[in-house]
Image: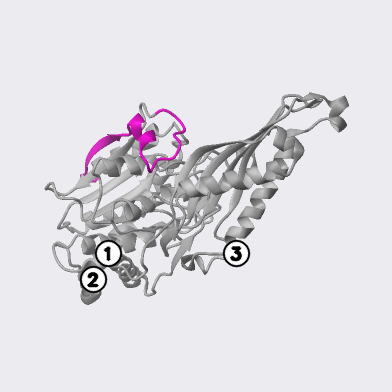
Amino acid sequence: MTGVLSGQDTARIDDAIAEQAEEAFVFLERLVAAPSTLGREAAAQTVIAEELTGLGFEVRRVEIPEAIADDPLAGIPQLPYRDRYDVYGTLGGGTDTPGLLLNGHIDVVPAEDGELWSSPPFVPTRRDGWLYGRGAADMKCGFAMAVLALRGLRAAGVDLARPLGFLSVVEEECTGHGTLAAGRAGILGDNVLLMEPTNLDILLGGSGVLWVDIEVTSGGGHAERADRSSNPVLLLNRVLERLRGFERTLNEHRDPVFAGIDHPYNVNIGRMSSGDWTSSVPARARASVRIGFPRSWSPARAEREVREAIAREAAADPVLAARPPAVRASGFRAEGYALDPDHPLVEAVAAAHRDAHGATPGTYVVGSTTDARFYLNQFARPALCYGPRVRNMHGVDEAVELASIVTGARTLARVIPALLAESGSPAAEYEEIL
C-alpha cells in the first residue's frame, strides 16, 4: 500500500509498533550510553547510521565546514569541526527533495552533576515506566519515536510515495551549525518535523537566544586587604543585576505570539568562575550568560542592547568605569521564529494525532529555541516540533516516559505517509480519509 491509509492499515501499523516497542527502547538505551556531549558525537552518530541503514536508508555523512563561522546566520563555534559531522539518510528512490525531512540533534548537554543523579547519567536506567539518562529526554527519545514509527510502517507493508529524509545533527544545543550546514548543502524537505520532546503537543515557535561571556577584572591581592580591594565577583554581580533589570523590561513588552507565556525572555547565568586561592582577592571573574530576546530583534540588535545595558551599569560605578567589563559573544546568535498555527503542516500532524489518540494536541511556543528557526526563517520550509513526554531536560534525572515514545510513533506513522502522498493537500487529504 502507498500513501493513503485505511482504518485496517492503521490497525496493522499500531500492532506492529506495539510489537517492536522494546527494540526501539533498546535503540534508545544504546544512544544514551554513547555520551554525545560537545565534540564527542561520533559514537552516537554511528548508532544512528547503523539503525538507518538497517531500515533501508541510504546513509552518508554531511561535513560541517570550518567556514561556517563566517556564515551570517552562524553562532560562535565551540570547537573545530574536524571528524564531527551530521548523518543524513534518504528512503525512497529518485533525486527529488524529500517530501518530509525528520530532523533531530544528537548532541546533549554535559552531566557534571552526576553524583546528584539517582543513577549514572550515561547508564540508561528504566524505572516506573521512565527511562533515565542524559539525553534520554533532550532529545534521543525523538529518534526512538521516529525509528519505531518507521519500523511499524515497514512491518505493515506501507510503501512511501515520495522520498523521506532523516537528519541527525550536531551543535543544536549551542550554535545550530549542524542544521545550518545541512541546509546550506541543500538538505531540506518540503516539510520538516523536528523530533524534539513536546509532551505529544505541537511546538510552533521560540524566542531569540544569545550567549555572551562577561568578564570583570581587578588588581587582585591578599585577603588581608579585601576590605580595601575591588573584588571582581562583587562587581560582576552588579553587572548581572543590571541584566536582570534588562530582562524585566523585555518581559513587560511581549510579542503577541508569546502572550500565553508569563516570562518568555529569560536571562540565565549558566556558568561562573573566579579566583585561584581562597586567601586571595580574585583578579578576574567571568560569567557565561544566556539571554532570551524578542522575535522582532535580530541577534545583532540583541547583542547591542546587552552591551549597552552593561555599559550603562559600568558608567554608573567608578570602579567598573575604570575597568569596563569585557563582553564577548560566545555561542548562540539565534533568531526567534514561529509557524502559523493554521498552516497545513500543523493540521496534518494534529489530524494524525487525533486519529491515533482520539484527541486534538495542543499547540504552544516556548521561551527558547530549536533548529526549526532555520527552516522557517531562511529556507522557507514549514517546520514544527513533535515528540514524547519528558521531564527535567538538562537537569538531574532527566527522563522520558517510555509509553509516550509508542504513542508518538503512532502519530508519526500516520502523518509520514500523508505528507509523502503523491498529490493533494496532505492535511486536507488526511482529514478526508480518516
Q: Earlier in the sequence, mark 2 or mark 1?
A: 1
Q: Quick check: marks 2 and 1 in contact, CB under 8 Å?
A: yes
Point out the tag, 3 or 2, that comes first from the N-terminus: 3
Closer to us: 211 or 169: 211
Segment tinted magenta in the rendering: 55-80
Examine the rendered structure and indicate whether residue 378 appears above or below residue 352. Answer: above
Is residue 69 a member of the stretch shown in magenta? yes
Other residues around mark 1 within 10 Å, as few (<14) / some (14–19) / many (≥20): many
Residue that label 1 marks:
414
State left or right for residue 124 relative to residue 215: left
Magenta stretch holds residue 49:
no
- In which quarter of the view is residue 234 placed? top right
Q: Is residue 132 visible?
A: no
> How would you rate the neighbour count of disc 3 (Cα within 10 Å): few for under 14, some for 14-19, many for 20 or more?
few
Mark sitting on residue 217:
none
Is residue 234 rendered to the left or right of residue 79?
A: right
Place residue 180 in its image quadrant.
top left
Residue marked by disc 2: 430
Please name whichever residue, 309 or 54, is drawn nearer the observer in this view of the structure.
Answer: 309
Q: CA distance from mark 3 to mark 1?
A: 41 Å
- Number of numbered markers: 3
* Image x and y of residue 173, in percent: 46, 43
- Marks 3/2: CA–CA distance: 41 Å
In this rendering, the label closer to the viewer, 3 or 2: 3
Q: For this rendering, which residue is in front, 67 or 309? A: 309
Residue where numbered disc 3 is placed: 252
